[in-house]
Image (spheres, rainbow, N blue to C red):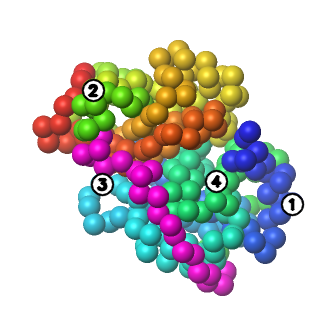
Amino acid sequence: MYNDYFVTPQWLNAHLFDGNIIVLDASSPPPTAPYDCRQRYLEEHIPNAQFFHQDEIADKSCDLPHMLPSAEVFSHAVGMMGIGNETQVIIYSQNNLFSSPRAWWTFTTMGCNNVKILAGGIDAWKAAGFTVQSGEVPPPETKKFTASRKDSNALNQQQVLDIVHDGKIQIIDARATARFLAQAPEPRPGLRMGHIPGSKNVPWDLLVENGMFKSPEQLKAIFNEQGVDINAPSMTTCGSGMTAAVVLMALTLLGNHNVRLYDGSWAQWGQDNGLPIEP
């Protein structure tokens, strides 16, 4: 099952210089401990990997972080990275699977069917004894990528409000339990505390270990313990739409393909906007 979504460091090392492979470091920092992921990339990356900046390749017409880009913005950006519609894209991150599922979700939402994640990220790559590079990587020859954006994958505020009122779609929040229960302040200033009414809480880091998802049996047990029906139509949310993709991908791995992501997440819902919340 996992082989459809992940590659091992050994596989990537054997195929690293294949003509149809593009490797991307898609690291983004958590808001609780921000750091410069691009600088870390410049200091150390998998050979020939390019940096996929999720806050730059985004919809920047609003003030919410890393919102899903338009088809035109995405197509231009990845085309400049040498990615065409038939290119095999391999994504990795520097930080325990925090941000690579979001990049995977972005690529699949844009109609890229040839995208996988490096299991364990760069840490697993180094642990396997493979070399790293530093500095800039000259982009390969530009290719044409034509996105087919699946707008239904990304929910907006009104759609989520409708889901809350309707009560027929399971809402899963990937934030830490203390934030979900309004016991800890939000790391982004000015946001209210609490959660979307009716939500269930599955902190994203319960699902991962050493840069990989836990086993299907462990994932099922965790979801069950948190009161989640792994087969039900669902939407995922978090602080900014980043780790919501971790929960979405975990459910996808378990066979649920009826899961959508609230792109604005708490960065939007938690504003002083009169939207309903629960503590």
Q: Is residue 149 magenta?
A: yes
Q: CA distance from mark 3 to mark 1?
A: 39 Å
Q: Which mark is residue 14?
A: 1
SS under mark 4? strand
Please identify the residue farthest to the top as the structure is shown. 225
Q: Is residue 91 left or right of residue 229?
A: right
Q: How many other residues sit within 10 Å of disc 3, few (<14), some (14-19) or many (≥20)?
A: some
Residue at 83% x, 54% y: name it.
Answer: 11
SS under mark 2? loop
Residue located beneath label 2 in the image? 197
Q: CA distance from mark 3 to mark 2?
A: 21 Å
Contact (Cβ within 8 Å) of mark 4 with mark 2 = no
Give the extent of the magenta segment. Answer: 140-160
The mark nearer the N terminus, 3 or 2, is: 3
Q: CA distance from mark 4 to mark 1?
A: 16 Å
> Which of labels 1 and 2 is toward the front?
2
Q: Amino acid at mark 1?
A: Ala
Residue located beneath label 3 in the image? 64
